[in-house]
Image: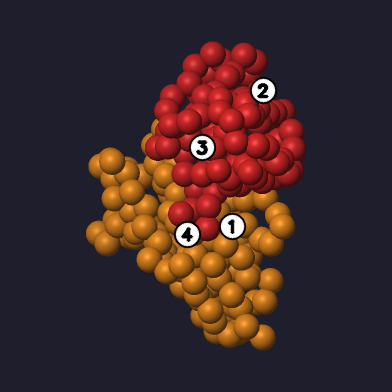
Amino acid sequence: DVKVTQSSRYLVKRTGEKVFLECVQDMDHENMFWYRQDPGLGLRLIYFSYDVKMKEKGDIPEGYSVSREKKERFSLILESASTNQTSMYLCASSFPQASTQYFGPGTRLTVL
Amino acid sequence: AQRVTQPEKLLSVFKGAPVELKCNYSYSGSPELFWYVQYSRQRLQLLLRHISRESIKGFTADLNKGETSFHLKKPFAQEEDSAMYYCAGGADGLTFGKGTHLIIQP
């Protein structure tokens, strides 16, 4: 059974703080993704990675960066958190080429 | 650019009535299309994908290339079908629609 875990379910940070969101998958998937989920806007792709140390910008990369040092781990970094980054963040992983994506439980981030 | 459109933000039907959640896509090439579901307080999970042509929890979805649609259907809604439904498609990465909140009234 595929397992995608995220480091925190809930996180509260202050404006300007550096925030790390961690995601780990145990299925040896090449692809990993970070989305944010907002009411009325659906899921929007922030960044994805198709291999270790590789990254590609998604639709809304501004204000975010990512790191993939190991195949199973994909980190999302908010260099200087802002209130408009308050959201639910979802991590997903998959085998290559639009194969089924498996999602983590999400991290609800609040930036005050 | 690939685009997935779900025209309904909210759909409310009575238990036992038929359900149709609409999804239209636009890309070049052959799309891979999926329906994902998120029940209350649960993670987003795959419901079905067009290439498998299967019925999951009574739901089916047919790819209509002429109309560029992939609507999700169920003949008789059940209360446990209440959830957020997302249509998604793409080649290298998935593009998600904005989602439809399905409410099944008793």
Task: Name the image quarter holding residue B42.
Answer: bottom right
Q: Residues within 10 Å of mark 4 (few under 14, many from 20)?
A: few
The Cα–Cα distance between marks 2 and 4, rounded to whole angstroms, is: 31 Å
Let me know if marks 1 and 3 both belong to one chain. Answer: no
Name the amino acid, label 4. Gly
Disc number lying in front (1 or 4): 4
* Residue at which label 3 appears: A99
Residue drawn at point x = 58 percent, y = 45 percent: A86
Q: Return the chain for callout 2.
A: A
Q: Is residue B38 above or below residue A6?
A: below
Q: Residues within 10 Å of mark 1 (few under 14, many from 20)?
A: many
- For the C terminus of chain A, the image quarter is top right
Q: Position of residue B39 (x, y in %)?
A: 66, 61
Res. A40 mark: 4
Res. A45 mark: none
* Residue at which label 1 appears: B37
The Cα–Cα distance between marks 1 and 3, rounded to whole angstroms, is: 16 Å
Q: SS of the residue at dot 1? A: strand
* Nearer the observer, B40 or B67: B40
Q: SS of the residue at dot 3? A: loop
* Residue at which label 2 appears: A72
Residue drawn at point x = 60 percent, y = 68 percent: B58
